[in-house]
Amino acid sequence: TLESGVLGYRVAPDAFRGVGWDSPDAKVASSVARTAAAERVPRPRGLASPAGRPLGATGTYNRSAATSYAHQWAYGRNSAYPDFGNLDCTNFVSQAFYAGGQVMGPESDSNGWWHNSGTHATGVAWRYSMTHESWMKFTGQRAYTAGSANILNFGDVIYYDWKPADGVTDHTVIVIGFDGSNQPYVAMHSPNLDFAPWASWMASWLIPYTPRFMGMWDTF
């Protein structure tokens, strides 16, 4: 967790550390300039999931619907879902995934990726970064590790590890566009941002980080 103070930001312990945690400081949003409109228009991408259709796949990921949802709610909260305040980043990306057609796992799995619309209860993977990454790649078989940012597609994900030595994912964002060099723009909660350059939106924090890039399968 990042805490703000007189001397800037510092990394502080989190109450929940077992399966990853999210950056909590929404105040930095005002320090990030919006990208010029001419650079924010999503461009067609010819990239597809590298290994094609996974064995037994029956669903299709609607990248356009996922990114449209991210744009709509980047600066707001959808009352149909729980609001985790300054720890809302993975919850936000999960909502966008669901809007894009991703199918929830069973609620019997407390660590799984699901949200109950009646009680607003969630599985751990719906809310926490590190478990979200693990569930999408392995349990749910919805995603794969991508080698770099410039091969990502709309609706893919970037995770950030604020303390690179610990290997724990701290923050989750969704890819919503690209600049002229194929570098992604991202949307997120905690802080609330849209069309933010993936590698520089948190430059003012002056803390080291390690990114991890996750591509979503087109079918699952």
Image (cartoon, rainbow, N blue to C red):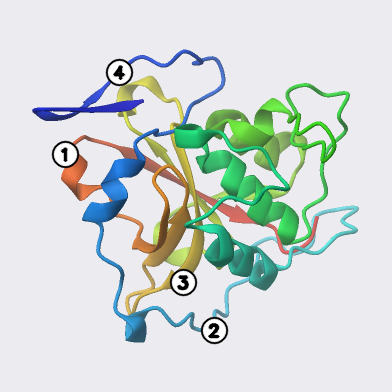
Which quadrant of the structure image shows residue 53? bottom right
Q: Residue at x 30, y 54 (%)?
A: 199
Of marks 1 and 2, which one's residue comes earlier in the chain? Answer: 2
Question: Residue tagged by mark 2?
Answer: 44
Circle 2 or circle 4, nearest the eye: 4
Circle 3 or circle 4, nearest the eye: 4
Circle 1 or circle 2, nearest the eye: 1
Which of the pair 194/61 is nearer the observer? 194
Question: Residue tagged by mark 3?
Answer: 177
Q: CA distance from mark 1 to mark 2?
A: 33 Å
Of marks 2 and 4, which one's residue comes earlier in the chain? Answer: 4
Mark 1 burial class by Cα count in 10 Å: few <14, some 14-19, many 20+: few
Question: What amino acid is found at the position of numbered circle 1 in the picture?
Answer: Leu
Question: Residue tagged by mark 1?
Answer: 206
Question: Residue tagged by mark 4?
Answer: 12
Question: What amino acid is found at the position of numbered circle 4 in the picture?
Answer: Ala
